C-alpha cells in the first residue's frame, strides 16, 4: 500500500503501521470520506485539525501542501469509495487512503450506563484504541454502536459516531457540554438541516421514535433499535437521511 509521508509518496512499510492504517505514535487526525476521487468537507476537517494541532502544539503543513498530498495519494491509491485518514504528529504527517465498504443495514444500538468507561474527547487524537475498544464491546454483544451516558446521566455520543434522535417529531442531537466531540457531520446537520441541540437523559431514550447514526464516513444511517426496542424507519426518516446526504458536499482536490 502507498501512503503519503511528510513530503512524498512511499510504501507503508517505511513506517510502523497496523492493517487498519494507524501508525505507531500519537497525534491528531481526521477521517474523511472520498467518492470517485472527491473528498467530503475537507475545509471543515482541516479547521478542526488546526484547532486540535494548536492544543497539542503540532505544526501542520499548509492547506495547499495537504491538498497536493491528498491529490497525489488518491491517484496512487484510487478507490471508488474510500476512507482518507490524515494524521499529524510533532514528527511527521501521514495520509492513508483505503477502501471503505458502505454500511446499508440499519444500526442496532445499545446504551452503556457505566460512565467510568467513557472518555469524553474534545479533539480527534490517536492512539484511538479506547474508542475502538468501546465499539468492540458493543459488537461483542451483537450491537453495531453504543450510546454513551456521562456521570450526570446525560446522553453524549457513540464510540465512533454522533446521533440524531426524533422525539415528538423533532430531530435532536446532544450538546457539546455533555461531552460530545464537535463532529463535522454534527455541525452540518445543525447548520444545514435544522437539527435541534438539546440535552437528553437516559430516560429520554424511551421516547425516541426514530434515530440516525451520523459520522463523516457513514454520513447518515437509520437505526433499527435501541436496546432491542424497535424504532420507526419511515418515509420521513429516510427522506431526512437523503437530505443530510445532499447537504454533505464533496470536492475535487486536484
Image: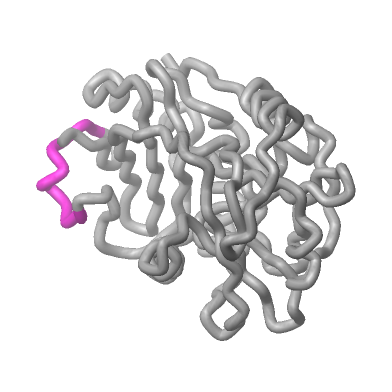
Front-most of residues 173 and 10: 173
* Residue at the image position 65 percent from the left and 44 percent from the top: 212
Membership of 36 in magenta stretch:
no
The quadrant in which the N terminus is found is top left
Does residue 152 sit above or below 24 in this rendering? Answer: below
* Residue at the image position 47 percent from the left and 39 percent from the top: 105
Q: Is residue 55 visible?
A: no
Q: Quadrant of residue 227?
A: bottom right
Q: Quadrant of residue 242?
A: top right
Q: Is residue 254 visible?
A: yes
* Residue at the image position 56 percent from the left and 56 percent from the top: 52
Q: Is residue 6 left or right of residue 29?
A: left
Q: How is the image coloured?
A: one colour
Front-most of residues 154 and 6: 154
Front-most of residues 153 and 224: 224
Does residue 144 sit above or below 74 in this rendering? Answer: below
The quadrant in which the C terminus is found is top left
Front-most of residues 208 and 158: 208
Q: Is residue 204 left or right of residue 89?
A: right
Magenta stretch in the rendered image: 8-18
Does residue 101 sit above or below 53 in this rendering? Answer: above
Q: Position of residue 89 (x, y in %)?
A: 38, 56
Q: Quadrant of residue 131?
A: bottom left
Q: Position of residue 152 (x, y in %)?
A: 76, 81
* Residue at the image position 30 percent from the left and 23 percent from the top: 79
Q: Position of residue 107 (x, y in %)?
A: 52, 48
Amino acid at each position: 500500500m502507498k501512503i503519503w509521508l511528510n513530503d512524498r509518496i512511499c510504501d507503508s512499510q517505511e513506517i510502523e503501521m497496523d492493517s487498519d492504517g494507524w501508525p505507531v505514535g500519537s497525534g491528531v487526525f481526521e477521517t474523511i470520506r472520498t467518492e470517485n476521487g472527491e473528498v467530503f468537507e475537507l475545509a471543515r476537517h482541516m479547521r478542526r485539525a488546526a484547532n486540535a494541532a494548536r492544543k497539542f502544539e503540532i505544526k501542520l503543513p499548509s492547506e495547499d501542501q495537504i491538498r497536493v498530498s491528498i491529490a497525489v495519494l488518491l491517484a496512487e491509491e484510487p478507490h471508488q469509495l474510500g476512507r482518507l485518514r490524515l494524521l499529524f504528529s510533532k514528527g511527521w504527517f501521514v495520509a492513508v487512503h483505503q477502501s471503505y465498504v458502505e454500511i446499508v443495514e440499519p444500526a442496532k444500538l445499545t446504551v452503556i450506563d457505566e460512565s467510568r468507561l467513557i472518555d469524553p474527547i474534545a479533539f480527534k487524537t490517536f492512539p484511538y484504541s479506547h474508542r475502538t475498544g468501546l465499539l468492540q464491546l458493543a459488537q461483542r454483544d451483537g450491537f453495531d454502536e453504543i450510546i454513551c451516558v456521562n456521570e450526570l446521566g446525560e446522553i453524549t455520543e457513540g464510540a465512533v459516531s454522533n446521533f440524531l434522535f426524533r422525539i415528538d417529531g423533532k430531530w435532536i442531537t446532544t450538546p457539546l457540554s455533555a461531552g460530545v466531540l464537535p463532529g463535522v457531520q454534527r455541525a452540518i446537520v445543525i447548520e444545514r438541516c435544522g437539527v435541534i441541540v438539546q440535552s437528553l437523559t437516559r430516560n429520554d431514550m424511551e421516547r425516541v421514535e426514530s434515530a440516525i447514526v451520523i459520522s463523516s464516513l457513514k454520513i447518515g444511517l437509520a437505526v433499527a433499535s435501541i436496546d432491542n426496542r424497535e424504532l420507526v424507519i419511515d418515509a420521513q426518516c429516510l427522506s431526512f437521511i437523503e437530505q443530510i446526504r445532499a447537504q454533505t458536499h464533496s470536492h475535487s482536490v486536484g
